[in-house]
Image (tube, rainbow, N blue to C red):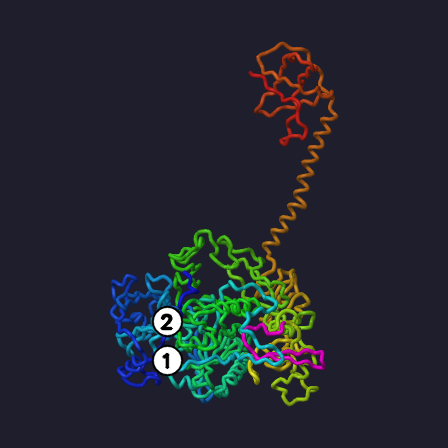
């Protein structure tokens, strides 16, 4: 099934009747809904026991009556639409919420009310699935109050929602038959084709950045832990429960979108500013974005280690007001896994699906995706998620360009934080065998019985087969753990990256680590940032292509960072952290977005090229700005447009001279030195990366060396000594005397055409083993021949050695018949 070509995810959320958005009777609710539809069908769905829909349940609720708040992990619904029966097979989206999911409410008196609901209190009723017997179908559904969701087919797209709250009657319709409010645009603008001293752009070009690749990690499963913040205006629209449900439903969509890119989005925390906003909220999306990202940076630096601000990978603000113009969202570009990873999103439609597509779009910018152009290919009938305008289509999908941008960003280290596999104990709910997620109590999980292809896992029990140690993973081969010390994630010769090694006790590769931000690289002329040696030259190549370099210092001296607009050039200290100045490379920017481009020549010899998305762009979404973490002087790096002192290393900068600091503040030791401090001999690596070598491998190596360097030479010398003595005895022994002729007897004769051997003294007589008779053979006279006859053997040769001598014997002694 080519899922990437399917019409994927859509969902309409109709708020509950107690939400302030819908105040009035059920009839007015139904009236409002139906007036927005040009064509629709009223249906009455039923919940069924199985995919044949023969046994029907008494209501639509998926809640288990014996355990309130807990919903069935799998269920079926059926309804008739346009003379066809649709049977929906749904499974609870157990990836949606981690086990330690929590919410926090900030009150006007400065208190923070933390809430960690248990499984029953969460009321998790969000499902994903398909239509039975309809290949390529996909369904996303909420069963919290009736059925709300979308049904994507290969050639059709349907929406379903209750006619009114708590009603058994539902409305099924197609998106094209719905009247929508005005659609919006992304604030990460593509600003026309205006160019100063550069020809106008000829359409959008594919990105061809020359950044050093961090590693080839695009095939690993990735997990993104998401933090959602709701401002005061958003909190005022809904009750506490309704707001939680809306956000969980929104993330259920986002999870569905990103699963197509093999990224699992998990809602880790919801923060609600109930009575007072924590940042100044204006109507300018760019200003709100800057304030929100600065707020996130402050929280990361000041909160304790177990704070949700520290362990989440991305933060998104739900803005309850309206931004200026048509903007409905804005985000920083290429900042995933950094302290400025986030965006702001206007909750602009009644249907939560639209907000979900906006948030997924802005998160795409965090991943380094740019707006799609006409040259980007989307699945048939679908609108690209990274289109600059949200549009009215419910069919959304990732374009070919978006996938390329993501792959490039991952290889540049932009997804470092996503490679850490979450502990099974943190996943939501109890284990569910067959969901392709290894949970508590499971050895393995290869999916359903019909889809499991594993040779190591029992799909029915989610237990390993007899003799198997593992099923899948970078450190699992042939159902057995790979040996400790085997590399499972290489550095691709990236000086700022640190390799990870199998531990010998797990199928997973250890969590991703890299050199601590600020570590020197490129001959101490640059600094490591998020696992990449970030230089001004490298960033110029990403915009202007191969051959581009950072402009002369005189270019930066004429540049005025926002923080130093009125500072004389001689006193400016942040110039290297403002607008990126470049020289050389292509005549036009190669970034796949139309931009303002500027080119100046100073003193007729210094070329200074810059780009901008806006004449007054100051937010981090502008790719023309120097990236955070870039070295701007001795012991200094860029941070939010300013040239700040490097933060102190979290561990000994040299790790006793035998290692370097990693991004988690631990020493990564050289081969032969032991973590955590690299002060004694050991296996190398760190407490985070796994050992470079292992004790087991060292023992095997020692045994092999002993075998080949000690035991083997002794054995060979003994054998060679015995053979040498045997040869010398034969050469020194006199030939045997000629016996007198004897009469023929009934015995076997032996004739040979070999030449007569030289005469030697006879060999000494020996005694044969007890199980043989020592009999002297009698040889008859040799037959006539032209050659001299060979004399018979007078005495049996010695046979004590079990190993034959190198010399081939002339005669074999024969035992006479008794």
> Secondary structure beneath disc 2?
strand
Residue 89 x, y percent position in the rendering: 33, 65
Which residue is at the far top?
743
Task: Report the front residue among 190 and 124.
Answer: 190
Q: Nearer the viewer, mark 2 or mark 1?
A: 1
Q: Quadrant of the N terminus?
A: bottom left
Total marks in image: 2
**The C terminus lies in which quarter of the figure?**
top right
Q: Earlier in the sequence, mark 2 or mark 1?
A: 2
User: Dot 1 surroundings within 10 Å: few (below 14), some, or many (20 or more)?
Assistant: some
User: Residue shown at 45%/81% (left/top)?
Assistant: 328
User: Would residue 587 appear left or right of 251 to someone viewing this image?
Assistant: right
Where is residue 130 drawn, in percent x and y?
35, 65
Mark 2 residue crowding within 10 angstroms, few (<14) / some (14–19) / many (20+): many
Q: Position of residue 787 (x, y in %)?
A: 69, 15
Label 1 element class: loop
Q: Which residues are magenta?
A: 586-612
Mark 1 lies on residue: 180
Q: Residue at x 66, y 27 (%)?
A: 808
In the image, 226 versus 326, the foreground residue is 326
Pointer 2 residue: 126
In this orientation, which residue lies closer to the viewer: 591 or 518? 591
Magenta residue check for 334: no
Mark 2–mark 1 distance (CA, rounded to whole Å): 25 Å
Q: Are marks 2 and 1 in contact (CB under 8 Å)?
A: no
Work out whether residue 565 or residue 127 is closer to the camera in this orientation and state it.
Answer: 565
- The verdict on residue 610 being magenta is yes
Whether residue 732 is situated above or below residue 78 in the rendered picture: above
Residue 578 in sight here: yes
For the point 62% across and 24% down, the residue is 768
Residue 430: which quarter of the image?
bottom left
Place of residue 484 in the rendered image (x, y in percent of width and height, measured from the top left): 56, 57
């Amino acid at each position: 099934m080519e899922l990437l070509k399917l019409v994927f995810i859509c969902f309409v959320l109709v708020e509950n009747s107690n939400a302030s958005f819908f105040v009035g009777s059920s009839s007015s609710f139904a009236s409002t809904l139906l007036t927005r539809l040009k064509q629709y069908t009223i249906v009455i769905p039923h919940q069924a026991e199985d995919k044949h829909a023969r046994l029907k349940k008494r209501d639509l609720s998926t809640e288990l009556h014996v355990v309130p708040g807990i919903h069935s992990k799998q269920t079926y619904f059926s309804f008739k639409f346009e003379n066809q029966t649709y049977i929906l097979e749904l499974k609870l989206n157990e990836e949606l919420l981690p086990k330690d999911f929590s919410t926090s409410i900030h009150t006007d008196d400065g208190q923070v009310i933390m809430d960690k609901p248990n499984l029953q209190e969460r009321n998790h009723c969000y499902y994903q699935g398909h239509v039975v017997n309809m290949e390529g179908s996909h369904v996303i559904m909420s069963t919290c109050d009736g059925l709300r969701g979308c049904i994507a087919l290969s050639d059709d797209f349907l929406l379903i929602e209750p006619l009114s709250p708590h009603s058994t009657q539902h409305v099924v319709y197609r998106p094209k038959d719905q009247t929508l409010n005005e659609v919006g645009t992304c604030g990460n603008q593509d600003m026309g084709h205006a160019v100063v001293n550069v020809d106008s752009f000829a359409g959008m070009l594919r990105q061809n950045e020359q950044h050093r690749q961090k590693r080839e990690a695009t095939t690993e499963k990735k997990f993104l832990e998401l933090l959602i913040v709701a401002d005061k205006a958003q909190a005022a629209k809904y009750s506490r429960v309704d707001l939680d449900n809306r956000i969980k439903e929104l993330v259920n969509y986002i999870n569905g979108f990103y699963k197509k890119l093999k990224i699992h989005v998990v809602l880790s925390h919801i923060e609600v500013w109930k009575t007072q906003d924590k940042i100044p909220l204006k109507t300018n999306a760019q200003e709100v974005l800057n304030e929100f990202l600065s707020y996130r940076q402050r929280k990361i630096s000041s909160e304790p280690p177990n704070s949700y601000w520290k362990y989440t990978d991305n933060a998104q603000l739900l803005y309850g007001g309206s931004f200026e113009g048509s903007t409905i969202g804005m985000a920083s570009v290429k900042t995933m896994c950094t302290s400025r990873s986030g965006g702001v999103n206007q909750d602009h439609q009644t249907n939560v699906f639209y907000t979900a597509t906006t948030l997924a779009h802005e998160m795409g910018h965090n991943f380094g995706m740019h707006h799609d152009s006409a040259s980007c290919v989307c699945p048939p009938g679908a609108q690209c998620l990274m289109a600059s305008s949200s549009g009215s289509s419910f069919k959304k999908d990732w374009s070919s360009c978006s996938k390329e941008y993501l792959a490039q960003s991952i290889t540049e280290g932009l997804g470092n934080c996503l490679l850490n596999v979450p502990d099974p104990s943190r996943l939501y709910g109890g284990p569910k065998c067959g969901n392709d997620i290894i949970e508590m109590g499971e050895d393995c999980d290869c999916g359903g019985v019909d889809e499991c292809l594993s040779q190591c896992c029992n799909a029915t029990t989610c237990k390993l087969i007899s003799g198997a140690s593992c099923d899948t993973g970078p450190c699992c081969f042939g159902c057995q753990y790979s040996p400790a010390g085997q590399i499972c994630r290489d550095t691709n010769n990236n000086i700022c990256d640190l390799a990870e090694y199998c531990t010998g006790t797990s199928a997973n590769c250890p969590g991703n680590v890299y050199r601590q931000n600020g570590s020197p690289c490129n001959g101490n002329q640059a600094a490591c940032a998020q696992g990449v040696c970030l230089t001004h030259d490298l960033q110029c190549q990403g915009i202007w292509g191969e051959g581009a370099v950072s402009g002369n210092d005189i270019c930066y001296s004429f540049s005025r960072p926002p923080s130093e607009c009125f500072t004389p050039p001689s006193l400016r200290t942040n110039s290297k952290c403002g607008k990126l100045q470049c020289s050389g490379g292509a005549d036009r920017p190669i970034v796949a977005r139309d931009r303002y481009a500027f080119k100046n020549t100073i003193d007729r010899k210094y070329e200074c090229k810059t780009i901008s998305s806006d004449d007054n762009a100051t937010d981090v979404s502008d790719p023309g700005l120097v990236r955070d973490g870039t070295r701007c002087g001795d012991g200094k790096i860029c941070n939010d447009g300013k040239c700040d002192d490097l933060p102190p290393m979290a561990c000994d900068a040299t790790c006793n001279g035998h290692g370097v600091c990693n991004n988690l503040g631990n020493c990564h030791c050289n081969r032969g030195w032991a973590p955590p401090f690299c002060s004694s001999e050991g296996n190398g690596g760190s407490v985070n990366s796994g050992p470079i070598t292992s004790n087991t491998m060292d023992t095997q190596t020692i045994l092999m060396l002993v075998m080949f360097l000690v035991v083997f030479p002794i054995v060979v010398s003994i054998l060679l000594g015995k053979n040498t003595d045997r040869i010398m005895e034969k050469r020194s022994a006199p030939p045997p005397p000629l016996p007198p002729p004897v009469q023929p007897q009934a015995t076997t004769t032996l004739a040979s055409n070999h030449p007569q051997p030289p005469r030697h003294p006879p060999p000494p007589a020996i005694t044969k083993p007890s199980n043989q008779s020592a009999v002297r053979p009698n040889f008859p006279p040799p037959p006539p021949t032209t050659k001299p006859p060979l004399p018979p053997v007078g005495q049996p040769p010695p046979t004590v050695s079990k190993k034959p001598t190198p010399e081939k014997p002339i005669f074999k002694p024969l035992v006479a018949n008794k």
